[in-house]
Image (spheres, rainbow, N blue to C red):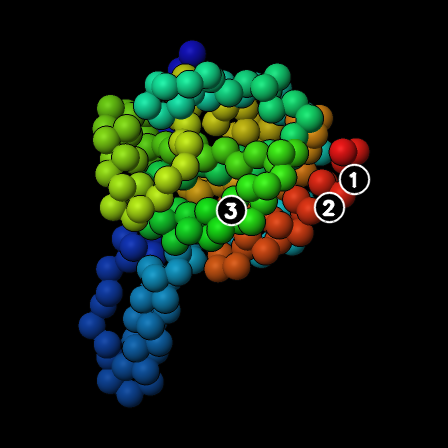
Amino acid sequence: MSKPTMQWDDAAERHQLGTPQRGNGRLLGLLATLSVVIAIVLGVRFLRPPSEATAQPAVGQQLTQLALEPLDGDGEPLTLASLKGQVVLINFWGPWCGPCRLEFPELLELRESLASNPRFRFVSVTCMPGNDETDLVAQTKSYLSSEGFDLPVHRDPTFVTRLEVMKLNRDQFAFPTTVLLDQQGIIRGVWIGYKPGVTLAMREQIDSLLANQSP
């Protein structure tokens, strides 16, 4: 199976700042510079209004392929069968990705707030921006250790899971991408990119799915 090419292509960070011009041109130049700075800090390339999460092409479709392995190889692989009956939030991210690192603490807070509910599962999937994942384990462990984060992390070694999400979502995929599955493995939300506070929208949908699930 050929592997997809996935790149974090943030136009804001590759933008070359020009020299401000005089008068109105200078003002426009300063505004442009400010816009670029804001874009770099907040990852504007990846911002999506929360309402778009339920309007993504993949929403309402069944996830039919999922093959994830523990990052350190210690433990059982994750499959759709092992997640059946749970509300599952799957986050695709990478330690090299700025927006991912901004979002990660918020996701961990969400995970912690639902830790006592056995009907919910948070799945963290670390990835590299391209097809070469040689340094994935080392980079991920280094990042988690430096931030003091302690949680199970998985990887997608055959790219099967990412390919499936990309196919269902008509190739709309970036880092981070977060997918919400209901108890039957049907996609109920897709968040592409990061926006501060986006986990509030995730929590609202998760609570709704859990409320509709029999104990």
Pointer 2 residue: 208
Nearest to N terminus: mark 3 or mark 1? 3
Farthest-out residue, left: 19
The Cα–Cα distance between marks 3 and 1, rounded to whole angstroms, is 21 Å
Residue 205 position, x and y percent, is 67, 47
User: Label for residue 212?
Assistant: 1
Q: Is residue 94 left or right of residue 117?
A: left
The extreme bottom residue here reads 23
Q: What kind of element bears circle 3?
A: helix
At a point 60% along the width and 24% down the height, the residue shown is 83
Task: Say which residue label 3 marks.
Answer: 112
CA distance separating discs 3 and 2 = 18 Å
Q: Nearer the viewer, mark 3 or mark 2?
A: 3
Looking at the rendered structure, the secondary structure element under dot 2 is helix
Give the CA distance from mark 1 to mark 2.
6 Å
Amino acid at the residue labelled 3: Glu
Residue at figure coordinates x 37%, y 32% from the top left: 127
